[in-house]
Amino acid sequence: MPLPYENATSGKRAIDDMQKILIAFGCNKFGHMLDIAAGELLVQFEYRGRQISVKASANGYAQAWLKEHPHNYRMKASKAQHEAKAKQIGAIAVYSILRDWIKGQITAVETGILSFEGAFLGQIMLPNGMTVLEQVTDSKLLPAPEAR
């Protein structure tokens, strides 16, 4: 069974869609950046004075793809080429995943299912430059997750 988003084809179109969704919602100061070394896509925007910063890991997606499509000796590609393909797929998929996640959160806010803060609490930037999630994680305010 294919992994969701593994056949996504355009990061640029997903970014354009994301920007349109956020502008229609009333957001401004939209921007995005791909940190190639960290394998992360960063999307930032502002809504009613609240700075939002959302990070998504393309490397995380690549690892999930490799788990679904492990390299084997029958493949024409080397293991390194197979892993490079996984990173390329992850780098494109992460754009569509973030677009759909943001669209879902904005829809939940617009329909009254969640407040804006409820939808984006972990991604709200604090005056110290950290997100709420980063602050909570660094301060160890939540217990460590249980092992599976």
Image (tube, helix red, strand yellow):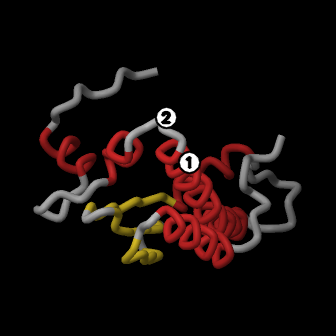
Q: Residue at x 48, y 58 (%)?
A: 57
Residue 77 coordinates in the image, percent (x, y): 80, 68
In-image side of 80 versus 18 (left or right) = right
For badge 2, the amino acid type reads: Ile
Residue 99 coordinates in the image, percent (x, y): 59, 60
Q: For label 2, count other residues whose C-alpha is less than 10 Å away and answer few (under 14), some (14-19) or many (20+).
A: few
> Where does the N terminus fall, quadrant-wise?
top right
Residue 129 coordinates in the image, percent (x, y): 17, 64
Residue 45 visible in the displayed image: yes
In-image side of 108 versus 116 (left or right) = right
For badge 1, the amino acid type reads: Thr
Query: Where 126 sits versus 36, above or below?
Result: above
Q: Within the image, what quadrant is residue 78 found in?
A: bottom right
Q: Nearer the viewer, residue 145 or 25?
A: 25
For the image, the number of numbered tags is 2
Q: Nearer the viewer, residue 19 or 83?
A: 19
Query: Where 28 sits versus 99, above or below?
Result: below
Q: To which residue does mark 2 refer?
A: 113
Q: Nearer the viewer, residue 117 or 58?
A: 117
Q: To which residue does mark 1 refer?
A: 107
Q: Residue at x 37, y 47 (%)?
A: 116
Query: Where 16 sits versus 82, above or below?
Result: below
